[in-house]
Amino acid sequence: MSEFVAPSVIKSDSEWRAELTPEEFAVLRQAGTERPFTGEYWDSAQEGVYECRACGAELFTSKEKFASDCGWPSFYAPLADGTVRYLHDNTLGMERIEVRCTACDSHLGHLFKGEGYDTPTDERFCVNSVSLKLRSVEQQ
């Protein structure tokens, strides 16, 4: 796993609660998960940059997004090294790799490797739509 880098955006739970919806807080700050096939971006093909909904850090782009049919937005790589960090996750009785925003330490989703997708990395960053905000090409 990657070396821990202290977040640059630090807020109390009460500050996060004031800025985020209850669903956003549950996912981003408490490592929850939205239901599959319900999120805003799971099947979006719109071009742009996906930012952390909590702090606005740029995390992924539509160029690395692919259709995995898993019910959540899937990316084969982050925008750049160091934009996300990884943690071991043993919840729910399975071994997984949690993905968090490096800038604010918000939960984004999980990383799965070696599933056989025809992508350059054979990795699937399975990210909650509620953790992201798309800045479309038109907005740039």
Image: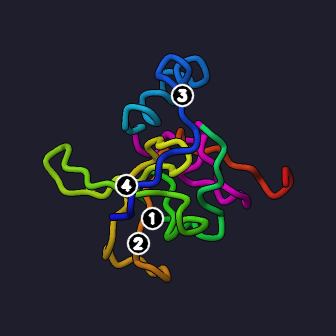
Residue visible at 41% across and 44% down? 36
SS for callout 3:
loop
In the orientation shown, which residue stands out farthest toward the front? 6
Cβ–Cβ below 8 Å for labels 4 and 1? no
- Which mark, residue 123? 2
Q: Which residue is mark 4?
A: 110
Q: Which residue is mark 1?
A: 68
SS for callout 1:
loop
For marks 4 and 1, give the one nearer the viewer.
4
Cβ–Cβ below 8 Å for labels 4 and 3? no
Residue 137, given in percent of the width and then of the height, sits at 81, 58
Q: Quadrant of the N terminus?
A: bottom left
Sequence-wise, the earlier of marks 4 and 3 is 3
Residue visible at 61% across and 65% down? 79
Kind of residue indicated by mark 3: Lys
Q: CA distance from mark 4 to mark 3?
A: 23 Å
